[in-house]
Amino acid sequence: MDDTIAKEHRLRVTEIYASVQGESLHAGKPCVFVRLTGCNLRCTWCDSTFTFTGGVHRDWREVAEEAHAFGIHTVELTGGEPLVQRNAIPLMARLLELGHEVLLETSGSRSLEDVPAGVHVICDLKPPDSGEERANLWANVELLKPTDEVKLVLASRRDYEWARDVIRQHDLGSRVAAVQLSPVWGALDPAELATWLVEDRLPARLQLQLHKVVWDPEARGV
């Protein structure tokens, strides 16, 4: 740990890079990614296990300036789980002050209560096959804004049926800007998921991970 950085300014960062947004309503946009280190979950299909440990301690104010210096309007905080670090909150607030469109990719297992109002939340609810269904903090659904999104990463028919019931039970189609159903890469055929989605007339969208189509699925920093 770098003891030269005061605790109230310390943030553990895995990487900061510019690429094209691969998911959400913002897919295809140039975006700066601030990938924070650490996660409280261990989803079976996780494609960013490298964020669980390591990283470098940075001053969140310097992180904000580095992200701003790319000259790209959209900035996303991702992980890991960004909200396991309390200084993710002032970082997002500062990025908003600097005029950025700020996205937060979060598992929904940590409260959204302190997330600045101007942040576009992408809340990734966990179905049974993730192994982390118990971690869903359902109070967060009530905190989602009409401009936010819900993402459900699905590995099986069981996951899909769970997602279908959650969407209907919480009226997610009317509550948020978009509900995204994303098949686990290599585990669930997107064509199957598309068929189920149409058959059930769900108020949701099929989402593919654009960055895994454009680049090698195992590539980092893209």
Image (cartoon, grey):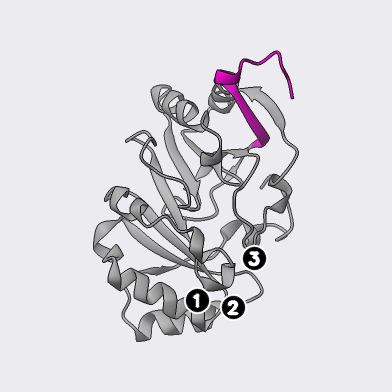
Residue at 57% over, 74% down:
155
Q: Which residue is mark 3?
A: 45
Single out the residue that lies furthest toward the front.
134
> Mark on residue 188?
2
- Circles 2 and 1, Cβ within 8 Å, touching? The answer is yes
Q: How many marks?
A: 3
Q: Quadrant of the N terminus?
A: top right
Which quadrant of the view contains residue 44?
bottom right
Relative to 30, residue 185 above or below: below
Residue 10 seen in render: yes
Q: What distance separates the C-alpha of mark 1 from that of mark 3?
A: 13 Å
Between disc 1 and disc 3, whose residue precedes?
Answer: 3
Give the SS element for disc 1. Answer: helix
Between disc 2 and disc 1, whose residue precedes?
Answer: 1
Give the SS element for disc 2. Answer: loop
Q: Which residue is mark 1?
A: 159
Q: Residue 134 in the image: state x and y as whole percent.
A: 50, 63
Q: Residue 197 in the image: state x and y as whole percent.
A: 40, 79
State left or right for residue 51 relative to residue 89: right
Relative to 215, residue 192 above or below: below
Q: Residue 212 in the image: state x and y as whole percent.
A: 64, 60
- Circles 3 and 2, Cβ within 8 Å, touching? The answer is no
